Amino acid sequence: MPIRRNHVVIVFAKSPQPGAVKTRLIPLLGAEGAAAVHVRLVKQALDTACQAAPHQVELHCAPDANDPFFQNCADHYGVPIRSQAGCELGARMLAAFRHALRKHAGVLLIGSDCPALTARHLRQAERALDEGNDAVFVPCEDGGYALVGLRRAEPALFEGMPWGGDNVMTETRSRLTALGWRWRELETLWDVDRPEDYARLMDSGLLDTPRAAAEMIGLRNA
């Protein structure tokens, strides 16, 4: 069953500018190759979201929605695009939740770094919110999370969070406890940031057979 219409899935993504995305993969793949991997991961995230929640997916873009790649995605997947609002990740996430929760009972937000995340995980997350949990998460092995779902926006979950560190989920649990919230955690997954993650990705078969970097970068304007 697809996710119901009173819920929405937000995909956060950065513009695939070589040298500005997947920077820890640049020593292995070069700037163009790392950007190519980012392109494919964004498309994978959109594929997953649209499979779980057809017509209920939004693509939120950083630094804004002006990159032709984003318009391309909007046309191909039939999703609205919005610029992320805020100076740092926590502020941008909070703004996205506040905006979406004006219209939806529950909001699921994912990034584009976790190809192991499936439509099944999104449907499980929706059920967790429907069962009365205030929040739901898919933790990652590196200490962060690949999905956060909320029924209400709470600044304490985002402000001053050490994003990019290995204790984001640990700190989030502490804040949830302080709030007195009820939450659920789904299975822990892994994301793609480091060269060893890329090797795992290639071995996993989660993405299509790798294309040449130049061909994949061409997807930005396809």
Image (tube, rainbow, N blue to C red):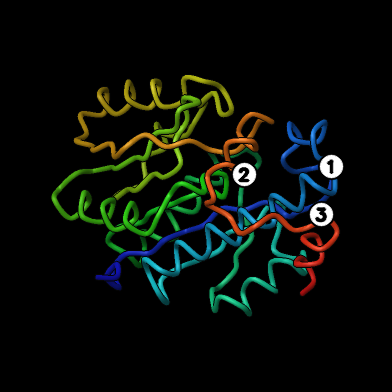
The structure residue drawn at horizontal position 30% and vertical position 73%, both measured from the top left corner, is: 5
Left or right: residue 179 versus residue 168 is: left
Rendering coords of residue 176 (x, y %): 29, 29
Q: Tag 2 or tag 1, which sits nearer the N-term?
A: 1
Q: Of the residues shown, which amino acid type is indicated by label 2?
A: Met
Closest to the observer, 69 or 97: 69
Residue drawn at the location 54% of the way across and 74% of the way down: 79
30 vs 215: above or below: above
Amino acid type of the residue that numbered disc 3 sits on in the rendered structure: Ala
Question: Which residue does the image show at 61% across and 53% down from the upper left?
Answer: 41
> In the picture, which quadrant includes the C terminus?
bottom right
Give how far across and how far down residue 168 sits, in percent: 46, 25
Dot 2 lies on which element? Answer: helix
**CA distance for labels 3 and 2:** 14 Å
Residue under numbered circle 3: 213
Under tag 1, what secondary structure? loop
